[in-house]
Image (cartoon, rainbow, N blue to C red):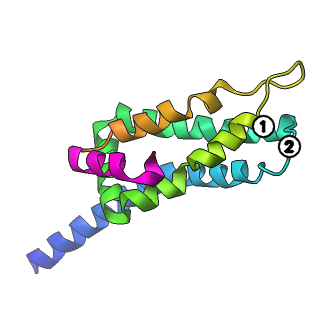
Amino acid sequence: MKIAIFILAVFSCSAFAQSDVINMISPVVEKKAVAESTFNSTPYRQKEHQEIKDYFVALSNLSEDAVGSNKLNRRYNAYLRSVGVKKFCSDIFLTKNDWETMKTNCTRNRFFLCSDDVLSFPASKKSVGETLESDLKDEFLKTSECQ
């Protein structure tokens, strides 16, 4: 009976921890989809620039949150172990070609200002990888979806 209660308690804690990380990642996934929808809306107007910026800021915040808390970092690593690094990266990162297209179409002119967050995408990706435990970090560096 005590073992069953212990297993139930561990399962409940891990489910809570995973939902915590999912709540952290979901906004990035949603903003990525919105940013991707801007590809055919060139030249970008203020609305598209804001949607693009929102995605890159959310991505940057994700890596900062994981670095800032050991507890959250452990949950973050456990989540990656459960879903896989490849899926995680494809869910939150634009492909390199998509980023290049977005960067090319995101021009600076007198009406619109392309966010610096767009240009710092490689650094944001790298910082997400920096928060991982060594085995996950190795997989992150080898996975094409993460590069």
Picture layout, residue 56 above or below residue 37: above
Find disc 1 in the rendering and name its residue: 105
Which quadrant holds residue 134? Answer: top left
Q: Secondary structure at mark 2?
A: loop
In the image: residue 146, left or right of residue 44: left
Q: In the displayed image of the protein, which residue is found farthest to the left?
A: 2
Residue 79, horizontal then vertical, whole percent: 35, 57
Find disc 2 in the rendering and name its residue: 42
Which quadrant holds residue 53? Answer: top right
The answer to whether any part of residue 9 appears in the image is: yes
Q: Quadrant of the N terminus?
A: bottom left
Q: Secondary structure at mark 1?
A: helix
- The dominant secondary structure in magenta is helix
Q: Amino acid at mark 2?
A: Thr
Residue 64, horizontal then vertical, whole percent: 44, 32
State the extent of the magenta-drawn residues as a range: 134-146
Tell me the distance, in whole angstroms, between the alpha carbons under discs 1 and 2. Answer: 7 Å
Q: Amino acid at mark 1?
A: Asn
